[in-house]
Image (cartoon, helix red, strand yellow):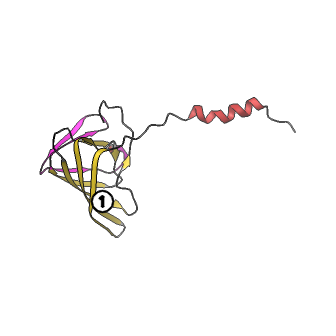
Amino acid sequence: MRSTPRAALIGMSALPLVLVPGVSHATPSSGVSSTTLYERTVDGTTYTLKRITISPGGTTGWHYHPGTVYGIVREGTLTHSDADCATDGVYSSGDTITEPAGPEHVHIGRNLGSTLVVLDALYVDLAGTPLTVDAPDPGCDFQ
């Protein structure tokens, strides 16, 4: 029986390190707090209502939602940007916002103002699904 040369084994064991692309890191939220106002599961769908507060200069971090989110801004102004680094909405008190589901809808919410942003968000998800999934910064010059 022939043994495999040691150099070949070492080379083969290092191959996954060369083939695996660099790991991107999620961008954490900053200055964000939330309170669950309501949560109920009906026929396999969970409805979660949260009051979200974003401090001046705060950010949600880059993320997406597995389910659709419906929101209303109660106070302040929310600046919403998509993964193309474009601002796709600026929402003030009384404005509504809908965020579609899926990883192709990565986005970030930022409070660029000097007062709190307060919004109520209704998350509609399959039972057992997380409300948000962190995503890496797509290369924008802001977070």
> Label 1 belongs to which residue?
124
68 or 6: nearer the viewer: 6
Relative height, residue 35 to residue 17 (above, below): below
- Say left or right for 49 vs 5: left
Q: Which residue sits furthest bottom?
A: 43
Vertical placement of residue 15 versus 66, above or below: above
The residue range painted magenta reads: 75-104
Q: Is residue 90 left or right of residue 59?
A: left
Image quadrant of residue 37? bottom left
Residue type pointed to by label 1 = Val
* Residue farthest along the left direction in this orientation: 94
Residue visible at 58% across and 31% down?
18
Q: Position of residue 71 (x, y in %)?
A: 21, 54
Q: Dividing the image into 4 quarters, which one contains the C terminus?
A: top left
Q: Is residue 78 magenta?
A: yes
- Tell me residue 82's x, y (percent): 28, 39
Name the residue rendered at 35%, 49% in the picture.
102
Q: In which image quadrant can residue 25 be found?
A: top left
Figure label count: 1
Seen as rendered, the residue at the extreme right is: 1
The x and y percentages for residue 65 are: 34, 51
Q: Is residue 4 magenta?
A: no
- Secondary structure at numbered mark 1: strand
